[in-house]
Amino acid sequence: MSDVLELLDVSVVRDGRALVDDVSWAVKEGERWVILGPNGAGKTTLLNIASSYLFPTTGTASILGEQLGKPGTDVFELRPRIGMAGAAMAEKMPKRQTVLQVVLTAAYGMTATWHEDYEEVDEQRARAFLDRLGMTEFLDRKFGTLSEGERKRTLIARAMMTDPELLLLDEPAAGLDLGGREDLVRRLGRLAKDPYAPSMVMVTHHVEEIAPGFTHVLMIRQGKVLAAGPMETELSSRNLSLCFGLPLVVEQRGNRWTAQGLPLG
């Protein structure tokens, strides 16, 4: 399998502080990765590099065979090959647009409708992805009136619209209640198990949000990688305790994961 994403000795330094520090990591075609770590660990920084919107201070980053910063690499040609969904994308979406329009505009790489003429095939694709995410009944609803869970599902459908080769999800379950989280995890599980779905990278703080079908985990703390590899070997109590800085017990129940702290005393 070829590398969809390859970081080699990557650091990002801002105001003398390393947001990520000497990170080497590779995502191969068909893999589904979870990035775990506490607040400020560098998770979103890694995702921003993977989306080509942030260049390393040192080291090399290659996405879909294109090295960032190398002569001949055109990020504007690269970005349509990468699907991205997260809070930063939600803030860019005009609240007045309908759910269908939010997804359709991705076909032109835009966030708002202008004077584009969408083809029937575009609308069919948008409707199909929204249906897959359980949003068929919301096509004409204004984006600004949606619940947090409905917005997140709309943005994932939008991220799939360009048929990306790499799908990046930044804390897709953040802010959801229990029902919303479980519904989203179930739908992400279906997507992760689809052999035709793109390679996926999802950032989260919680192992409970890891959907069935995700294959690998990267744990990061204070900008440094603590563990990286297959879920069944690397998502351990020891690694998670080191990652979050307190004693934790990780258990797998069926095809889901849970974690809790050890009792005091």
Image (spheres, rainbow, N blue to C red):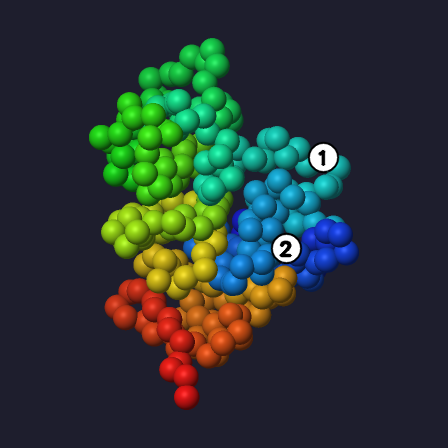
State the residue position of label 1: 72
Foreground: 3 or 21?
A: 21
Kindly tell me whether residue 164 is visible in this rendering.
no
Q: Quadrant of residue 251?
A: bottom left
Q: Position of residue 86 (x, y in %)?
A: 46, 43
212 or 2: nearer the viewer: 212
Residue lying at 35% horizontally and 41% vertically, measured from the top left:
148
Can you name the residue that lies furthest to the front here? 265
Disc 2 marks which residue? 7
Residue at 45%, 60% in the rendered image: 205
* Residue 181, position as x, y percentages in the image: 31, 52
Residue 2 is situated, as x and y percent measured from the top left of the image, at: 54, 52
- Tag 1 secondary structure: loop
The residue drawn where x is 46% and y is 36% is 90
Inter-mark Cα distance, 2 to 1? 19 Å
Judged left or right of residue 95, residue 229 is: right
Residue drawn at x 39%, y 64% as measured from the top left: 207
Q: Is residue 223 left or right of residue 113?
A: right
Label 2 packing within 10 angstroms: few (<14), some (14-19), many (20+)? many
Q: Amino acid at mark 1?
A: Gly
- In the image as oriented, which residue stretches furthest toward the left? 137
- In the figure, 258 relative to 201: above or below? below
The picture places residue 206, in percent across and down from the top left corner, at 41, 62
Question: Along the horizontal axis of the image, is 200 left or right of 132?
Answer: right
Q: Quadrant of residue 252?
A: bottom left
Where disc 2 sits, the SS reads strand
